[in-house]
Image (cartoon, rainbow, N blue to C red):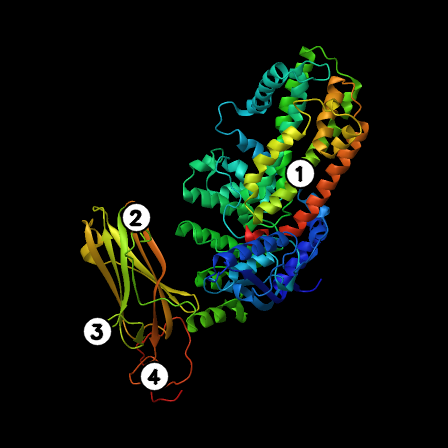
Amino acid sequence: MGNIAIQAENLGKQYRIGTLRNKQNFREAIIGSVKNQLRHVAQLFYKNAGDTNEAGRTIWALKDVSFQINFGDRLGIIGRNGSGKSTLLKILSRITEPTTGFAQIQGRVRSMLEVGTGFHHELTGRENIFLNGAILGMKKDEIRKRFDEIVAFSEVEKFIDTPVKHYSSGMYMRLAFAVAAHLESEILIVDEVLSVGDNKFQNKCLNKMQEVGEQGRTVLFVSHSIPAVTRLCNKAILLDEGRLLEEGPATKIAKTYFSKGLNYLPAERLWQNADSVPGGEIVRLYAVRVKAENGEIAEQVKINRAVEIEMEYNVIKGGYILMPHFHLFNQEGTKIFITLDIDAEWRKRPRPEGRYTSRVLIPGNFLQEGLHIVWSALITLEPMIVQFFEKDAVMFQVVENADADTARGDYARNIDGAVRPLLKWTTSYDAIKH
Amino acid sequence: MGKRAFFAESLSNEEEASSIKATVASVRIEPTNGWVSLNLRETWEFRELIYFLVWRDIKVRYKQTLLGGTWAIIQPFFTMVVFSLFFGKLAKIPSDGLPYPIFVFTALVPWAFFATGLSMASNSIVANSRLITKVYFPRICIPIASVTGGVLDFVIAFVVLVGMTLYYGITPSIKMVCLPFFLILAFSTSLGASLWLSAIYVRFHDVRHVIPFLIQIWLFATPIAYPASLIPEPWYTIYGINPMTGVVEGFRWALLNTNTNPGLSTILSSLVALGLLISGALYFRRIERTFADII
């Protein structure tokens, strides 16, 4: 047994897409339909029957993807929606077969492509742990052995003998994740499952995943959250339109992902559709914007110029003390800071209903050059509840300004680091030689 | 390298070594074509999953029902009442010299097991599409579990059946030891037909409309309301082509001491059931690779 846990060679997956029918007359339609029926019947036995002259009706969800994962690697799979991430996971999980190529896998694979697969709402929490565990491939003894651990992790001890249909969605998710998080296998495949639940729980999940990774198990991880990928994974592959664009260290791949504009976000976002608006009964987000000093929406700001980020929101139910805040990430997925609104005017004052705009000014000569991603969030303090938490709300790019005096001074080469603040330096001088 | 060392260490851990050694098999994922092996060994490895699926089906079936497991008796019982009234009393259909109610109930109990299993299992793949698209396991576990789930209902109804034979003063004979064989025959027929239907169902939802219709026709093609002895040789033996004939006649023979001689017919039924099961399993295996894509 070598050091290689998974070796994928030229993996490809072709899907047939909905039949596009040309206009035809009645007779043709009849003949065509009979032909179709016969072909369908033939398909019962031969999966390739009727494939002729249908080339235009298929798409490659994945094409010529080759990579290698060593034991103990935590591989992040990055890409836009529809880039083939899920297809790749499905092939490696043996849910679907590749059309071309092969993958050689050493060791048991268990996958968590969805939280709570096979949960039955009529069954109790306890029963679902056993059912779900068995579906995910655990043995009964294994589940029994880890039962207490799973329950403790899920924090639903009190309701463990209640049918899960009475659970809140948060409890349901916690229980479901808890089962999956306790799978024992050499290789663990995890799809976008951490995007559920509240922030605290997401963090707990991420910690758990990190723990799994540190146990030396091989993890394949898909997430839209680049920070989650860079935190969890040492390596990553970047997929786009079914092809593998790049593989390498996770932070490097994250950078490529942003720099190629694969994760494009605008500098202004408006939520006008009542169905998808972030928020609830108290506050609803309306807009998030990035503005330059002149007050205009800006996708790019110069490094020596201030940038203003604002969120506009509607207070639907008055009487609460609110705390808006932003999270700022760089293109490697590192969180640079969280900034909370501590403006004295509203800090301790319950807010009446109405529309508000809260702004924060980030001074020039502070941020690093490159892409910055803004998450927009708001909490009520009493009770402490997250009202909305909009990840990947907007994005802007900080660019160099050669004409101005910046933190770069006269140094022309690359300067890395999460921020590039212009700080005050002083030098004292003493003419006496020691 | 540290992680590699850790992995090596966990391999040497005695407690886990055996289980890991046994399962760290290399898996090769690649396109397959044509007929593939049944892979019974892997299905056997997933027997606990089958157990849990059966357990789920049983637990859930009578949740939030008023009468619960009594339904297992009510259905065949009332069918018996209706059949006795119309076929026994009005149409005066012969019943091998036995009281008509016990004659028909003996057939209805295994029939209910067969028909419920067929209907549940044929729907089972589509009904469990969430599982199919999210988790890997041998898909055949699902229809197997669906048919097996009916065994409990069968046992409940069977207790009533035995009670009835005693009520009608029929003394049980040693022939009863053959009953498990006929139950297995019913199981195989149900599963074999379901494997075909459930796999076709994934592509063609027409199957949903076919199932109730098929069960109804099959019911009358099986000597339930009438005795097979109405049929003269050699047709009686050939009648065994319908494996449920073997089951029903077998139950009557074993439980009610009928004077029928199902020997040859039973052999024919068993062969057909076996053929149905094997062909169904092969076909299922052939099509299952496309389930997740087209479900």
* Chain under numbered label 4: A
Mark 3 is surrounded, within 10 Å at the Cα level, by few (under 14), some (14 to 19) or many (20 or more) other residues, namely few
Position above or below: A178 against A412: above
* Chain under numbered label 3: A
Question: Which residue corresponds to mark 4?
Answer: A409
CA separation in Å, label 3 and label 4? 25 Å
Discs 1 and 4 share one subunit? no
**What is the tally of numbered marks visible in this picture?**
4
Q: Foreground residue, B244 or A200?
A: B244
Q: Foreground residue, B141 or A221?
A: B141
Relative horizontal placement of residue A159, taking residue A277 as reference (left or right): right
Position above or below: A175 against B261: below
Which is closer to the viewer, label 1 or label 4? 1
Callout 4 secondary element = loop
Position above or below: A423 against B269: below
* Chain under numbered label 2: A
Relative horizontal placement of residue A243, taking residue A80 as reference (left or right): right
Asked if residue A268 shows in the view, the reply is: yes
Question: Which residue corresponds to mark 2?
Answer: A280
Residue type for callout 3: Asn
Q: Foreground residue, A410 or A49?
A: A49
Callout 3 secondary element = loop
Q: Residue at x 70, y 64 (%)?
A: A2
Which badge, 3 or 4, comes first in the chain's sequence? 3
Which badge, 2 or 4, comes first in the chain's sequence? 2
CA separation in Å, label 1 and label 2? 50 Å
Q: Foreground residue, B250 or A256?
A: B250
Q: Which mark is residue B191?
A: 1
